[in-house]
Image (spheres, grey):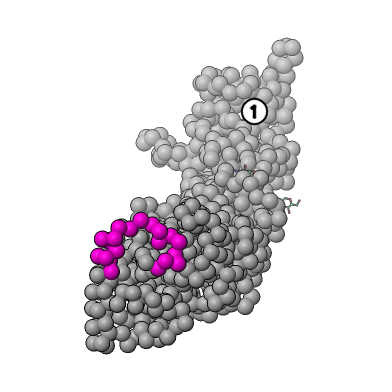
Amino acid sequence: MALPLLLLLTFTILTSSVLGYKTIIDVLSDDARFETLIVHIQRARLVPILNKLEAGTLFAPDNDAFANYHGPDITQDILLYHLVPWMVPTHDLYHHQILESSFRLDDYLKNNTGQRILIRQGPSATLGDNNNAPSFLVNDARLILPDIPVNKKTIIHAVNKVLEVPDMLAPSLESKSVDLYQMMDRVGLIHLINQHQPFTVFYSEQSILQDFNDVEQSYLLSTYGDEDLGRMLDYLVIRGDIYTDDFVGEKEYKTISGEMIVIKADKKKNGEKIITVDGQLILQGDILASNGVLHKVEDMPRTKQVAFDIRKYLYGIDATKFVSLLDRYGLGYYLAPGVTNFTVLAPENDSIDEGSLPDNLKKAWLSYHIVHGQWFPDQLHDRQLLPSEYKSPQLNDQAQRIPIGLYETRKSSIFFGNARSQNAPITINDNAIYQLSSPMNLPYDVFSSIVVDLELSSFIATLYVSGVVDKIKSASGITLFAPTNQAYKSLGLVATYLVHPTGRHDLQTTLQYHAAQTLLYEHDLRTSAYSVATLTGHDSLEVGGVNEQGMISIGTDNGTIHQTNVLMANGVIHKIDTVLVPPSVSLTHRKMLVGMESHRVLDWFEDFSWLDEGGDYILLAPTDRAFTQLDELLGSGWEQKDREAYEHLVRLHVIPKAQQLDRRTLLGGEIEDYPTLLSNRDRIMIHGGSYFAENFVQVMGQTGQGAHARVLAKGSLRKYTQVIQIDTVLIPVSRGLFGLPWYWSLALVSGLVLVGAALVGWAGYHFWQKRRRAGYQAIQDEEEERPSEPAPQDDSQQE
Ligand SMILES: *[C@@H]1O[C@H](CO)[C@@H](O)[C@H](O)[C@H]1NC(C)=O
Ligand SMILES: *[C@@H]1O[C@H](CO)[C@@H](O)[C@H](O)[C@H]1NC(C)=O
Ligand SMILES: *[C@@H]1O[C@H](CO)[C@@H](O)[C@H](O)[C@H]1NC(C)=O
Ligand SMILES: *[C@@H]1O[C@H](CO)[C@@H](O)[C@H](O)[C@H]1NC(C)=O
């Protein structure tokens, strides 16, 4: 094998010397520095090719170069890469010259040309060497012995390193910028530039993301941002290998994103070439790759085709579930690129539990998270109600509101309904996005809205027992005034009646009266007064305006609103301190008695037709138990045994309106003692709460004071019209002692007491007579004429 080669070599040398024509092989063989090279050339069967060469330049690594070489095995391809098929003497070399080698990789470069070699001007030649001739770098190798002549068209330059064939673009890029490589890999660009086709790629040490904010970066790096990121990266790649030498003047090149990129080349005065790509300076051009070339730029050229919008920002903050729900329920148009002037309240991905809401409510619930207008924190205040984009049929297509909560102790947070936002809003295209730690709940129905409020338990209970709740639930756009438990309590016996089965209809009307058929939020009520239709259908309610204490007024009896704006699905609830009895509910004594189950007092209405069921008077109603006690004393049926006495007793329990009016003027309401229907002298003193620990009533007769009866409960039907429940049946004092018809006067009373009482009575009478003459009696004249005036015998006896 060595022999024919040797022969061939000898032959070549012989012929060339004979003809005076040398080949590369001749020259290398003569030079001991290229022994290794010759061996590789022989092994790679390159001798015939080199001998046939008409013109060329060989970059010849010397023996040391091979000794230091640790690359892949030397092949014909590698050796051919050291050969340029025309003559390039050093005086033709220049900085950034690209030479095309004889090594060709099919289609790797444009027009299937050879792999390129880059000539650079190295650090200026060591002084003394070759009269300051510029030193050159061939790729990474130094040109150590230039211009070794071969023949007229062929030359050898000795180099100190074996030239390595450039890598593919992808690994070259990876070694320059891992980040960019990884991004390009994500969007499939690495796969593209790994093809056997030529590309030109621009890269920079600056991140392509550096000009984007956190949200935009996070979007671009998410899977949702692939397309935009791809577009940005595609803008950095041009098909074909274009070297800095090819850039002349200003020219547009089509990037693989389809967009044109402007590359401009200028010559500086010193001859240096300045190249900019979309205005970004090329810092290092012509980084060779086997399938193209890389140019390092100062900063990344940026495509103009990537624009941000609400949707992309929502992806950027990971609110992906929210976005996909908006899309699924046909609300994607809120996220379209052109949308401006909206505020989006975006719940975090993890906090959304799709199962927690029925599908038919999801669209409503989603649109509840969008508000028209760009709302910044300084435009929000505590208890504000923001109208959402949920135009609810249950509110007659008005916007359901979002209550804003700002708390002193949690200054950095804003509450939107039940949901908290801890960060400043993110703005995009005049829209604002707040991130919510949880989704907002749509306002619930009436029950669920107030069930947690212990102060409203009576209201809730009455709504429930009356069956009115369904009517309230099905009404739309209502304002519900919810009386507190205290309000129910002050209603006393009226409440007892209303919750009694017989009061059901009146209870229903009363409750419906608390629901206005208009949506009135606190702000509305503060700013003006309304007379609004209620659910009763025929009663209207006065509400609105503020009193001297700054409270919103309601009703005609100085009622006020205490807590406002509890939202519900079909309206709003305000808490009030009074139960409003509508005009269409007429409360009568009889109804009260039924509610109290005071059967014995009810009998009075049967027994005495003059007792008016609905008149204006105070009725003192002893309990059935009190009557039982009396029965024990007198024997049952005592009413029938002395009808007159029975009637007197009944009359003692009635305080007519006229008397109340009179006493009011006379006593200024301090201790109120009222004449009864029995007579002016048979009075009832009512001790109110402020001076006495307990409420009680007491009979005041002309002969002294009778027993106390405790007040068990009261109910005010109207002004001057009450029922007062007492624990004892009242007995007229004036007749109880000697009025023989009274069976119970057989109660043991000693003669002394009798006389004493008579004397006291007589003295009292005279005193009274004097006062009467002095004119005090005028007011009572009317009463004296009543047919029920007590029998005169008592008076005469005492006189
Ligand atoms: C490549 O070939 C085409 C035609 O085949 C020619 O027009 C073009 O100038 C060539 N480009 C280079 C860089 O040689
Ligand atoms: C958010 O939710 C969507 C849809 O359920 C899911 O595909 C995505 O991976 C989630 N993203 C994060 C960051 O949790
Ligand atoms: C933005 O929306 C708010 C609230 O609906 C509105 O008052 C305002 O006029 C809007 N601004 C613009 C510029 O459209
Ligand atoms: C309501 O308040 C006014 C003024 O405070 C008072 O004069 C009036 O008597 C009150 N009315 C009722 C029914 O309490």
Name the quarter where the C terminus is drawn.
Answer: bottom left
Query: Which image quadrant for residue 9?
Result: top right
Q: Say which element carries label 1.
A: helix
What residue is drawn where x is 62% and y is 78%? Answer: 538
Q: Could you tell me residue 329's position as x and y percent?
A: 70, 56
Depth check: 574 or 503 in front?
503
Query: Which image quadrant for residue 1?
Result: top right
What residue is drawn where x is 40% and y is 59%? Answer: 746
Depth check: 379 or 2 in front?
379
Residue 742 magenta: yes
Q: Could you tell me residue 408's position as x and y percent?
A: 35, 56
Q: Could you tell me residue 119's position as x and y percent?
A: 53, 41
User: Does mark 1's beta carbon lie closer than 8 Å to ligand 1?
Assistant: no
Q: Main secondary structure of the magenta part?
A: helix
Residue named by callout 1: 79
Q: Is residue 147 visible?
A: no
Decide: is 65 above or below 307.
above
Q: Is residue 4 visible?
A: yes
- What's the residue type where badge 1 is placed? Leu
From which residue to which does the magenta span run? 739-758
Decide: is 502 above or below 161.
below
Depth check: 72 or 325 in front?
325
